[in-house]
Structure formats: structure tokens, C-alpha cells
Amino acid sequence: MRLLGRLFLVCTTAAAWLPAAGAASAGPAGAAVAPTAVIRADFPDPDVIQVGSTFYAYSTSSSAGRIPVASAPSATGPWTVRGDALPAKPSWAGNGGFWAPDVSRLPDGRYLMYFTAPSTATGRMCIGAATSANPLGPFQPAGNGPLVCNASEGGDIDPSSFVDTDGKRYLVYKNDGNAVGRPTILWLQQVGADGVTFVGGRTELIRNDRPEEAGVIEAPVLVKRPSHYVLFYSAGSYTGNGYFTSYAVSPSLTGPYTKAYRPLMTTATFDGAVQGPGGTDVLGNRVFFHGWVSNARHMYTAELGWADDYPVVRGSRVRYEAERGTLNHAEVRTGAAGASQGAVVAKIDYADSWVDVRVFAPVAGAYTAYVAYAAGYGDAQHLVTVNGSAQFALSYPNRGWDNWTQVPAQLTLTTGWNTLRFQHQTRWAELDYIEIS
């Protein structure tokens, strides 16, 4: 399996040096910041744009309308659901939910909406388009039929727009293969400036080829970073907390794309603060996504950072393997039973024994470090130093060798890369990994 460079190190993504020092304590103050639920009502598969100083969000059908639209003065709200952005049903569409809208602005100033709707002709979900002079709508359906509607591949859903740095516009979408026992593929289709005229053929980006995806990948969103393209997507069944968000990268728009070693956001990486995080959209330095609350999917937002152009979401655990840090008078032990990646840092046994691990913070502030260790000859301690300045003693209760246990520590980190040093203080402990959330 080909891995994504630094992505091998982490739980959700990534991993220069920063001149400013952080502060740290092992006490209860300064705990990790969880994502914020900004629309506490059913608002699935959110798509968010900014027009001037106002933010607009669109969602899958709910009691608020065929395509509910909300607005806010800032990304964190307060958000107000304003009604239905698509009150007129397209002539080709039947009754049922309209899914996963995407809104972008065209060169002529109009707003283009892509949406998914049930096709009366095929009985499958298909992709349509609509336009409006106002981001609140009403959007008017474009044309007499869907843009993409291949019944033989299960129909087509989850459209999103992408404009590259050269100004070329693209439609990214999913064929709904998992609905008919066929491969599920995320496709790239170039379109004209109007967003609805196809240019050339489509290109496969990725497909459902990993066990943890449970046969489903969907909700694609493309972002261009200086060193590569980043394709965000959701996977698993959207109906529960097994739904998650991951991503893949490629130096070329058309691929090949390599999937991240571990997902970006899961129920577990958020420590249960969000259930089934998916349907993710990216806007500037934030992600917007939904999570289950009772029988509804609320809209959440969280801060987004880029560690060497790989995404890191605040509040979602990122794993950094200790053995990939910088060691002094210590050594890497391979074949460690039950350890992450099978390797740990051992023999941190002397006054000058330490390991430096670099960790990334999307923004400055409070974070929690979960340090995985094993100690077998009594309780041990390391002296933890943050960015060469703030220090505290971290205790490791004796749980036995090769019994990898996590102990939390509260940190204050600076924006970007930070360096944590774990230095011998009392007795003996081995380090497996550090997770930051």
C-alpha cells in the first residue's frame, strides 16, 4: 500500500519550527475544543458560501424546504434558517428528497446550484442545476432534464463545483454504485463557464476500495493547495455514527489520488462530541459538516489548518508516532506487541534521554495530548517541554509492559508546528504515540 508521506504518522492527517513558545499543564485547565453545533436542527450535507460579510448555507431536504437555506453574519453564527432556496421542482424530478446541494458564483454574477433529485424517467437519483441572482434564491431549474443521470451505474449524486487556479470550472460527483451493487466512483467533469456545458469526458478520481468504507464513498469536495490537490469525501453508512470524513491527495488534478492512511474526522477522533461527522464542506480556514443528534443531523463547524498542505481539524485527534520523532540516548524498538505501527521509543532511561515529537495546531489555543505509553516497573514520569519553554511532569501509572495505555495532558499550543520533548525523569516508560485534539 502506498502511503501519503507524513500521513503515515497520524490519526486523521499530517504533522518549520515555530519561534514562539507554548505553555502547558497536566491539570484540568485548557482542555481540547470540540466542534460547535451552529444549526441545531436537521440540516444535513451542508454547503457553505460567503458573499461579502454574509455566510449562506444550503442543505439536503428537511421540513424547512426542498433545499433549505440559512444565513449568518459569521461562520459561527448566529445562523437563521431562511426558507426554501428551490421552491420550484424541476420538470424531470419526482417526489422525494433533494440531496446535497452545492452553490457557487458564476462569472456573470449569478449563483449556480447543483442538486440531486429523483428522476421520474429512470427511478434513480440524478444531478440537476438551477440558477438565481440572489444567494437566498429562489433558484430556477436550468434545462429540461438532469445534467448527469446514468441509471446503469446506480444514478448520480452529491455534486460539487471546483474552479482551478487557471479559471477552469469542474463538476465533481459520485455515481451511486453502492445502490445497485456496483463500484462507487468519484468523478471529475470539466464544464464551461456556465457550469452546465460539459467539456470533454469525465475522469475517475477514487472509488470505494477500503474495508472501513463499507462500500460507500460520497460527498466529494476539491481544494487546491500549493503542493497538491486535496479531495475530501465521506464514507460508510450515513445513517449512524460509523459515517466519517477522509481525504485523498494528488499532485495532478486528474490523479492518481492517494487516500489518507487514517480518516480526518470520525466519531472516535472527536471523542464522541460529534456522531457520524460527514457531508463535509470546506470554506477558507473552516470545515462545515453534519453530525447526528437524536434523529436529526445538525450542522457543525470547526477550525481547519494545513500541516504541510495536509488538513488538520481542531478537536479531531491526530496521531504522531513517537518512533518517528528525534531521539537522544534512546532507541526505537520494533516488533512491539500491540503497539501502533508495531514500533515504540524505548530505553528513555537516562538523564539525557529524550524524544522530540512535532505536532500541529490549526490555531493557537488549548489542546489535549493523549500520550500512549507502557510502564512495567513501577510508576514513571517524563518531563514534558513545549516549544523549549513551558514544562510539566507527566506521570505514567504502572500498567505493565506492552500494555499500551493513554494518559491525557492539557497543552496550550501556538498556530502551526509545535515541538513536544519527552525526557526521562523517574523510573522507566516507553512511548508509542501522541494524539493531539
Image: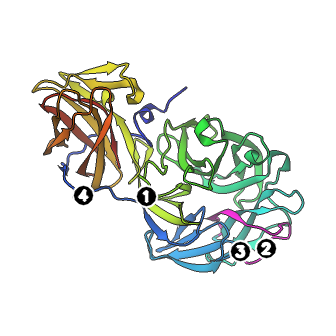
| Residue to which mark 1 is pinned | 273
Residue at the disc numbered 3: 86
Q: Quadrant of residue 127?
A: bottom right
In the picture, the quarter occupied by the N terminus is top right
Give the mark, 2 or 4, whose residue is nearer the N terminus.
4
Nearest the viewer among 124 and 136 is: 124
Amino acid type, mark 1? Ala
Kindly identify the amino acid type of the residue bearing the numbered disc 2.
Answer: Lys
Question: Which dot, 2 or 1, sits closer to the camera?
Answer: 1
- Range of residues picked out in magenta: 87-108
Question: Pointer 3 and pointer 1: residues touching (CB < 8 Å)?
Answer: no
Q: How is the image coloured?
A: rainbow
Marks 2/3: CA–CA distance? 7 Å
Placement of 382 over or under 76, stated as above or below: above
4 or 3: tag closer to the N-terminus? 4
Front residue of 273 and 55: 273
- Residue 301, x across and y down, in percent: 46, 62
